[in-house]
Amino acid sequence: MRRIKTPHKWHSIFWELIQTKNMVNCLTCLLGADVRLHGSKLNLKSAHDGSAVEWHQDWAFYPHSNDHVLAVGLMLDDMTMDNGPLMLVPGSHRVEKVWDHHQDGHFCGAISPSLNQDLDFDSAVPCIGKAGDCSFHHVRLVHGSAQNVSKDSRRLMLYECAAADAWPYFRFSDLEEFNSRMIAGRPTVEPRATNVPVRMPFPPAKKQGSIYESQTMLTDRFFK
């Protein structure tokens, strides 16, 4: 098993974690008083062979009306250089660009390293820490992670959070459920639209289900 989708729906502890006082304080400082949970996932990298995740921007998967959107990474295990830590390309979120995440005309959820030489992957910084530590990264920050080659498993709980006035461009159908994901403040039916770069993830990936499946279509892989 590589991922559990929307764990906040399956056990209350995952919903309670994102609503703790310290977490809410951090989120409101970064996103404003009104914050909504966009989604959650628990990534599991088993010992010795936990899967790599190729370079990508979260923004390529779920563009919104504005980019007050980020991801929180809560380390459930120590994250070391050997167990496939999150790797972040510093400053890539400041470039007002969505790099191409397509292969052979279809979305694949990954950036080709040879076709995007304006990205300095060698400058990537590892996000290492102890269990219980958190990271926060902007939705356009380029990131990925290598295979887990250690003897220890590595679990990372990820929350996708957005300002309440950042509305997703697609995959929205239930306003009541949408509003039930408010972490702080109040919901709104007045999206704030700003001039942000958007590249829609269409035509959809030939292999659906998860980022792991979609990225198998990439022929030019960085993490071997």
Image (cartoon, helix red, strand yellow):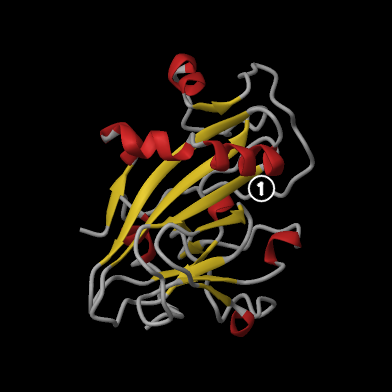
Q: Quadrant of the C terminus?
A: bottom left
The answer to whether 60 is drawn above or below residue 167 in the figure is below
Where does label 1 land, which residue? Answer: 198
Residue under the point 55% across and 78% down: 113
Locate residue 147, reporting x and y percent: 34, 77
User: Alpha-carbon neighbours of circle 1 within 10 Å: few (<14), some, or many (≥20)?
Assistant: some
Q: Quadrant of residue 221?
A: bottom left
Relative to 2, 77 lies left or right: right
Amino acid on which disc 1 is placed: Val
Residue under the point 40% across and 34% down: 16
Who is closer to the viewer here, 180 or 200? 180
Who is closer to the viewer here, 209 or 176? 176
Locate residue 10, reporting x and y percent: 26, 34
The answer to whether 45 is drawn above or below residue 43 in the figure is below
Q: Secondary structure at mark 1?
A: loop
Relative to 94, 25 lies left or right: left
Q: Quadrant of the N terminus?
A: bottom left
Relative to 89, 111 lies left or right: left
The answer to whether 45 is drawn above or below residue 168 in the figure is below
